[in-house]
Amino acid sequence: DTEVTQTPKHLVMGMTNKKSLKCEQHMGHRAMYWYKQKAKKPPELMFVYSYEKLSINESVPSRFSPECPNSSLLNLHLHALQPEDSALYLCASSQDPRSNIQYFGAGTRLSVL
Amino acid sequence: SQQGEEDPQALSIQEGENATMNCSYKTSINNLQWYRQNSGRGLVHLILIRSNEREKHSGRLRVTLDTSKKSSSLLITASRAADTASYFCATYSQGGSEKLVFGKGMKLTVNP
């Protein structure tokens, strides 16, 4: 099983809402990632979790809050987002955090109204 | 920051033709990878080439790496309409970096 599952596929939220994006993998990978991708742009790294600990935060605004409850799950909690945060949010995992192939989920298309 | 720059940014070809995409990067790398992304979907890993390798093949894909020029190329032979997608090169910097940095990407359109 080489699948990374993201839910929901689509999300529309207001600027005062609180929502969460979920990501799950059962490949035994010990590194998980959140990326943000705007249209016609490459993915931009947001967070890296290595062995369930946050190892990289790319200066992401605090309205995005990651959580790694266990080695298979990764959440991204959203609060007080801005319209410019509308994007495709991608989750990925890799066997370990250094120099490995990353496996991506299909993404969550987020629209902030 | 973006490490890689693909060239050309967009390419349109006919089915059966070959497609070549080039990527340049700036720092010393551990490996270079190519990913494909169908419209609005997740990325799929295509091939990885290590810094001590010069060429690698996988099916219809051929990747070359020139570390002296800090560049790589991806060749797709006998293209198919299903190859229509965006293609990204991505690199891990040398020294055990945990950060995979993507290039700007190239949109390939294969016309039937």
Image (cartoon, coloured by chain):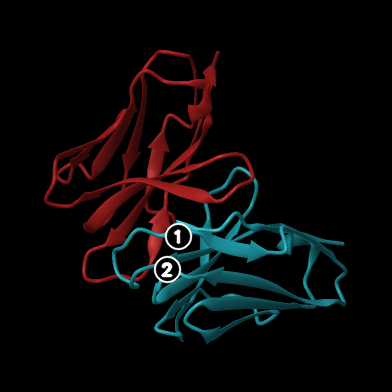
Q: Which residue is mark 2?
A: A27
Residue type, mark 1 in image: Asp
Does residue B30 appear left or right of residue A74 in this picture? left
Residue located 33% across and 72% down the image: A96
Looking at the image, the residue that sits furthest to the front is A1
Image marks 1 and 2: residues in contact by CB distance under 8 Å = yes
Chain ID for red: B
Residue B98 lies in what quarter of the image? bottom left
- Tell which subunit mark 2 falls on: A
How many angstroms separate mark 1 from mark 2 (CA)?
7 Å
Residue located 37% across and 18% down the image: B78
Chain ID for cyan: A
> If you read the primary sequence from the N terminus, does the residue marked by circle 1 or circle 2 appear first?
1
- How packed mark 2 is, by other alpha carbons closer than 10 Å (few <14, some 14-19, many 20 or more), is some
Q: Which residue is mark 1?
A: A1
Residue located 25% across and 71% down the image: B96
Q: Position of residue A31 (x, y in %)?
A: 41, 74
